[in-house]
């Protein structure tokens, strides 16, 4: 019932956007001989443009690989997609995040796998397969948040909220210094600008509140389906990469902040302690350092655990969703699955060679823009 209601609400969002477009054009064209109607039409048109459906685009700042650039990597991705029974990936991009996600771009909604290289470096080979399988399985048709109807409605509402967000820079702070030249005129001008800014904020409050309420309603309505899709994705991940790798990926979510801090530290160390080397020059052992740090974190975690105790489930305090505890317990209680797709040493080596160039490009980007801890 909630899923059907979510589709209905998303349909109303798209119909409302179309109505805003049509109404704004009518106001501008029919009332062109007046002044008020075209002005109202322009305001309505701006609102319609703010909530228009977005066609996704590739991030131009992220290193990008296509099938011809990395045949070994895409061969692995195709095997995982076939085992997960989902569409193949068209493009791969690499980000400094500790995650693996699937985005869509273009009118045909092609699929781009955004691989966080810190996660890729921190995970053993079979956990990388599990992380990819989990991301691809989340794109199955039962995940309505990634579908064309509900997904595009959520994206449009989120983008509209960003467009209509409050602008703190619109206000002017002025202390009326009696010794300043023409201080009274400056203070009066500041008051007029602040009054106009407050008026525009009040006018935008109504559509902004409506968008936020609709987005929250869609998120609430799609929550059961999203949780079911996560459970189904866990089952697919266990069958594809093995149950052990699926559980390990969930248990390693608590490493996100620690790996983010280590990535940030390495970037700062490279920029400040590199001697005569350029600040944008990459370190050949950068990703190896991330892998070693992750191994030390796992060793410390395992040594602190009592002998024979189960691996701790992720918690909200550790940076994961509380729902993940149920997911780990569910996978542990289910029958164990062997890996259908695995990475041997030769495959790991070939993929590492293909990722060397984008890895260096991502390091250069982090050196330029900085690495924000998770």
Image (cartoon, helix red, strand yellow):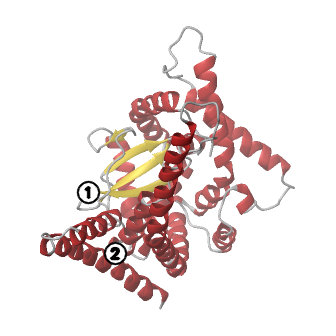
Closer to the camera in the image, 97 or 173: 173
In the image, is residue 121 above or below residue 127?
A: above
What is the number of the mark on residue 149?
Answer: 2
In the image, is 145 to the left or to the right of 230?
left
Spot occupied by residue 98 in the image (x, y as percentages of width and height): 56, 47
Which comes sooner in the sequence, label 2 or label 1?
A: 1
| SS category of the residue bearing label 2 | helix
Closer to the camera in the image, 164 or 226: 164
Spot occupied by residue 288 in the image (x, y as percentages of width and height): 58, 31
Residue 81: quarter of image: bottom left
Q: Which residue is mark 1?
A: 106
| SS category of the residue bearing label 1 | loop
Residue 162: quarter of image: bottom left
User: Distance between the Cα atoms at labels 2 and 1?
Assistant: 15 Å
In the image, is residue 55 above or below residue 44?
A: above
Residue at 48% across, 44% down: 344
Q: Are marks 2 and 1 in contact (CB under 8 Å)?
A: no
Mark 1 burial class by Cα count in 10 Å: few <14, some 14-19, many 20+:
few
Query: For the view shown, which residue lies furthest in the bottom direction?
Result: 1
Mark 2 burial class by Cα count in 10 Å: few <14, some 14-19, many 20+:
some
In the image, is residue 148 above or below residue 356?
A: below
In the image, is 321 to the left or to the right of 231?
right
């Amino acid at each position: 019932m909630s899923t059907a209601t979510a589709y209905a609400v998303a349909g109303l969002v798209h119909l409302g956007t179309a109505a805003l477009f049509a109404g704004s054009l009518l106001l501008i064209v029919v009332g062109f001989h007046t002044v008020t109607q075209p002005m109202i039409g322009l305001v309505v048109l701006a609102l319609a443009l703010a909530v228009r459906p977005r066609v996704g685009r590739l991030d131009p700042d992220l290193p990008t690989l296509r099938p011809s650039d990395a045949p070994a990597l895409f061969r692995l991705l195709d095997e995982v997609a076939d085992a997960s029974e989902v569409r193949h990936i068209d493009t791969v991009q690499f980000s400094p995040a500790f995650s693996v996600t699937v985005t869509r771009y273009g009118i045909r909604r092609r699929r781009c796998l955004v691989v966080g290289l810190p996660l890729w470096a921190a995970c053993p080979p079979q956990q990388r397969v599990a992380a990819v399988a989990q991301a691809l399985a989340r794109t199955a048709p039962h995940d309505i948040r990634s579908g064309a109807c509900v997904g595009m409605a959520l994206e449009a509402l989120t983008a509209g909220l960003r467009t209509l967000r409050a602008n703190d820079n619109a206000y002017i702070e002025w202390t009326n210094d009696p010794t300043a030249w023409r201080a009274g005129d400056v203070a009066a001008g500041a008051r007029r600008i602040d009054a106009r800014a407050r008026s525009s904020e009040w006018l935008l409050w109504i559509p902004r509140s409506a968008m936020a309420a609709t987005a929250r309603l869609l998120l609430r309505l799609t929550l059961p389906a999203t949780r079911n899709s996560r459970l189904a994705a866990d089952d697919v991940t266990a069958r594809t990469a093995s149950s052990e790798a699926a559980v390990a990926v969930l248990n390693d979510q608590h490493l996100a902040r620690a790996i983010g801090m280590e990535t940030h530290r390495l970037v700062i160390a490279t920029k400040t302690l590199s001697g005569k080397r350029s600040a944008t020059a990459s370190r050949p052992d950068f990703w190896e350092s991330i892998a070693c740090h992750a191994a030390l974190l796992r060793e410390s975690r395992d040594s602190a655990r009592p002998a024979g105790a189960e691996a701790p489930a992720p918690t909200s305090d550790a940076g994961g969703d509380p729902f993940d505890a149920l997911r780990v317990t569910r996978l542990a209680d289910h029958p164990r699955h062997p890996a259908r797709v695995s990475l041997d040493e030769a495959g790991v080596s070939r993929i590492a060679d293909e990722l060397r160039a984008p890895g260096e490009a991502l390091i250069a980007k982090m050196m330029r823009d900085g690495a924000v801890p998770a």
